[in-house]
Image (cartoon, rainbow, N blue to C red):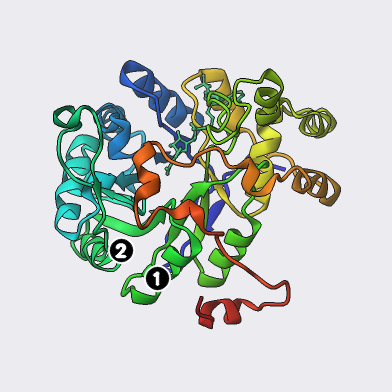
Amino acid sequence: MTNRMEYLTFFNGQKMPILGLGTAQALGDDVEKAIDKALEIGYRHIDTAQRYNNEAQIGRALKKWLDSGKIKREDLFIVTKLPSTGNRAECVEKHLKQSLHDLQLDYVDLYLVHQPTGYQDVDPKDNGGKMLLDVNTDHVSLWKAMEAQVDAGRARSIGLSNFNARQVKRVWQSARIRPANLQVELHVYFQQAELRAFCRALDVTVCAYIPLGGPHRQPPSHNANAADANKLSNHIQLTNPVVSQIAQKHSKTNAQILLRYLIQLGVAVIPKSTNPDRLQQNFDVFDFELSPEDMDMLERLDKGPAGRQVRSHIPEMANHPEYPYNERYWFREKSMTDERVRTSLF
Ligand SMILES: NC(=O)c1ccc[n+]([C@@H]2O[C@H](COP(=O)([O-])OP(=O)(O)OC[C@H]3O[C@@H](n4cnc5c(N)ncnc54)[C@H](OP(=O)(O)O)[C@@H]3O)[C@@H](O)[C@H]2O)c1
């Protein structure tokens, strides 16, 4: 097998490299150097967000490559996200224009609504550091403003992040330009089989965030024994013995097995790294294939909702009417056809 990039195709024919570079918490010089190294290795899909505070550094690195002629704009796939302080129709254009200015680009390949919940656009410092909820978030009018960004040529495609199935379907039903992609937490401990089936039926591609299980993250705060060392190792899938066994068999690292598994499920992955060796390692996942037995063993590692790590970045978010995580994503009968999923109401 050759180590060749694979792609997901959106409903509109646009192709997204199935492997991208995550950049959350990659800041300053680190992220600029990481983009440089990643482009050299062959990464073309880069995931950022206005909230990550690194678009200007990423833009500098991209400009250097584009100006040098070593890369063409059409070879890149750049994703950024509308911050939840801008989850109102009248704010979308302003935020995307700011992202494009910082990224030094004329358009992004994919623009995502970062969160289904909205916040007021006021300085938290004046509120004792607290984010204030905007409880009037309206996904339908927000989506119309997202569509206008495609019309204006600022985004090739638009999509959603952290929305549950009910929220995705509401946008999908109201859309003139359908969401092309849903970015959600997804890894071997939280495999989201129902949500993936739901998205497939709607022809919405899925991108997995924290695909390595976010080894840098603390155990989930809803875990009662968060401080317990056993629970911590339980949460770190990079050292899982089943993953290690499969890695040994293929002479690959555990991280490569975790990424390859998701790719073979047809899900895009955006592992974050600023380390040159790990950037290379995460990219080298197209020269081997997991067997059906490997896939079965990895499928059995799913912990369901108990495997979820991210509930909210901000505690107040749980009080928002569009807080997505209190509902089960989707109930699917095994025999349900894609057509039935599309037409059913819930
Ligand atoms: N839409 C959303 O709400 C949302 C939420 C969270 C994340 N995201 C996106 O998803 C991306 C990935 O998520 P994430 O960064 O939280 O988690 P992740 O990619 O699962 O894990 C990143 C961590 O793993 C380490 N790492 C990377 N490659 C490794 C390897 N081969 N072996 C061992 N350790 C490795 C990294 O450290 P080094 O850098 O030192 O290698 C970093 O600490 C983010 O960067 C962001 O772009 C989106």
Task: Report the quarter where the N terminus lies.
Answer: top right
> Is the shortest distance between ligand 1 and the CB of mark 1 under 8 Å?
no
Which residue corresponds to the image point at 20% horizontal and 56% vertical from the top-left?
88
Measuring from the top left, give residue 296's x and y in whole percent.
Answer: 81, 49
Where is mark 1, residue-wise? 170
For residue 29, which quarter of the picture? top left
Q: Say which amino acid is labelled 2.
A: His
Up-down: is 343 above or below 155?
A: below
Percent of width and height locating residue 75: 39, 46
Seen at 28% across and 64% down, the residue is 143
Q: Which residue is mark 2?
A: 139
Determine whether, in the image, residue 187 is placed left or right of residue 32: right
**Horizontal side of residue 292 vs 14, given as left or right:** right
Disc 1 from disc 2: Cα separation? 8 Å
Q: Residue at x 58, y 46 (%)?
A: 186
Q: Name the residue nearer the viewer: 301 or 331.
A: 331
Is disc 1 in contact with disc 2, using a CB cutoff of under 8 Å?
Answer: yes
Q: Secondary structure at mark 1?
A: helix
